[in-house]
Amino acid sequence: MIEASNLTKLFKDKKRGEIRAVDNISFTCRPGEIYGLLGPNGAGKTTTLRMLSTAIKPTSGSAVVYGINVAKEPQRVRSRIGFLSGNTGLYRRLSPREMVTYFGKLYGMTSDAIKERADKIFAMLDMQSFADSRNDKLSSGMKQKVSIARSVIHDPPAMVFDEPTTGLDVISSRTIVNFIRQCRDEGKTVIFSTHIMSEAMRLCDKIGIIHQGKLYTEGTVQEILDQTATTDLESAFIKIVEG
Amino acid sequence: MQISNVITIFRKELTDTLRDRRTLVFMLLVPIVAIPLLMMGMSKLMIRQITKVQEETSKIVITGREWLPSELDSMFTAATDLTFVDSSTFADTGLVEVLQLGRYEALVAVPDSFATHLQMERSARIEIKCDRAELRSEQAEDRLVDLLDDYRALLIEHRLTERDVSVAILEPFEVNRENVAPMQKMVGEKLGMMLPYLIIIMCFMGAMYPAIDLTAGEKERGTLETLLVSPAARIEFVMGKYMVVVFTGLVAALLSLGSLVFSMKYMVDQLVAQVGSMLAMEFEASTIVLIVLVVLPLVGIFAGVLLSVSIFARSFKEAQSYVTALNMAVILPAVVSILPGVELDYTLAMIPVVNASLIMKEAISGTIMWNYVIVALLSNSILAALSLVFCKKWFERESVIFRM
């Protein structure tokens, strides 16, 4: 369960002054559900997800992950969240196994637990053949799998995906999409951001439309379409943000 | 702060760093291979230059040879390391120009009154022109002066014998001079100039790439964000990274020290064997211990500053350009050891890099002034700690860490 209430983030910019990157956003994301934040670039999606994953602190408002406040106990929140974005990369000179082991240790797991979990993940993602090659020798699809393995080594109950398919080819992005579905099926709380309407439509149980730091509306795809009397998300989006 | 996390991060970063070719080049290859090659090449070149010049006969242009007393004339002819060419060969060219062209090494002008003045026991004059900027020309001058000194002594002896006076009357007493400066100090003066400079620069370069790679490199690859959302506290990965940078800088510095000591010894031995220079080279264990002691807090400062600067950068490239500027800021004070006449005082002992450079220089030449050493170690340690604290603060700032 992830609950954001009145989440706000201000940035100070020398030229533009104070920027409200995220402005008073509230939403709830339940276990076994994929919540999609849909909005164009610069809408505030990444900032929101970074606050949820404790990378940055909210200016005001709060977010609670499985009962723990992100601002007050970031350390405890971190072990309950798996984070993956289109930009997250790999340590080129490590192997997938070394990489996953490193993060497992940072998450406080024992070596035995890491090994057991890693073997399970490698089998599930069909990674055994390259688990010990160096990351910079891998294809982009393989690299995505390593990123996925890294994000779930500690078996977190909540998953945060920040534009996970951006810049990926069809095969890699299908790997990710399948993985997101699998997370939901396992009963994890999944939050996911994208600017691709079709992806949101296919994947999300619930969608929040975000633009210029504000959450305009939220609901199931059908609800949003009904609400705007449109047949596709793109028109719905335009209608909503242009009022 | 959990030590186990710091160790996990340190070990991972070290593994990662030691697999990086650029780091290895600066940390291992340059100190172990490039420095000895450079030093040995230099010594070979020096020896070759010196022995070559020594073997050459000096070509000297002479005017008014006919005015030489016959005894001196035959000494000129007999000298194996000098050949004389009569100036009449260059009727039209200016004689000084002939010298400057470098085909002849020196010029001797004998005035027409020379022989007669000597005969009459009046003071006579002979002129030598040379170009002291040229090793060869200087050597020719030395050889000529030696020859003329010999002749003068001969002449004095003749004159005194004629008057029935003992030659000893000219030398009521002798002065025996002995240089009491320890050999270590003399060599130290020369080598002490280069060694601190090279060690400081190598130390900085050894720390440079890992520092960039572990910060701006992580930003660029998108791994920093994954680290930020892991339960490791900021201070833990700052410590882990800091330790790796200190480690590589230290390894580079120590390897450079080792290879400099080794190759300078080799160089000196070569010079002694082939040129017979009065050189000796002895590094005492205490000197080396002191150098290590001085380098330690210095690496600490380098690591803190390098990490702070590179985490601020958006990309590897940006970090590189900052670090290049920083490199200059290290080279300039390090050069202090090469400048003559700069001596440690309490002010200089507090300035990082400058203090290390001067302490190393003096240690090599055999003097250790513990009061300055302590001030320098304290000052550098405090600065190292401050740089680490600053680095931690910097890593906690969202505007720095997410500066993309």
Image (spheres, rainbow, N blue to C red):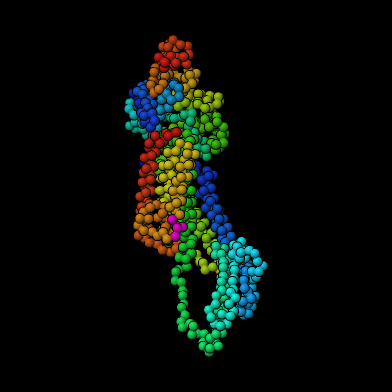
User: From the image, which quarter does the C terminus of chain B lie in?
Assistant: top left
Q: Residue at x 49, y 39 (%)?
A: B317
Residue at (43, 50) in percent of width and height:
B299
A127 vs B108, nearest the viewer: B108
Give how far across and how far down residue B23 sits, in percent: 51, 45
Asked whether residue B65 is in view, the answer is yes
Query: In the picture shown, does residue B273 fall above or below B231?
Result: below
Which residue is situated farthest in the right direction here? B89
Q: Tell me if B61 is positioned left or right of A25 in this view.
A: right
- Find the magenta span and give its range: B336-340
Q: Which residue is at a point 45% across and 61% down the rendered structure image?
A: B364
Q: Where is residue B234? Give x, y as percent.
A: 39, 38
Q: Is residue B247 above or below residue B133?
A: above
Q: Is residue A173 magenta?
A: no
Main secondary structure of the magenta stretch = loop
Q: In the rendered view, would you say B304 is above or below A216?
A: below
Q: Nearer the viewer, residue B173 or B304?
A: B173
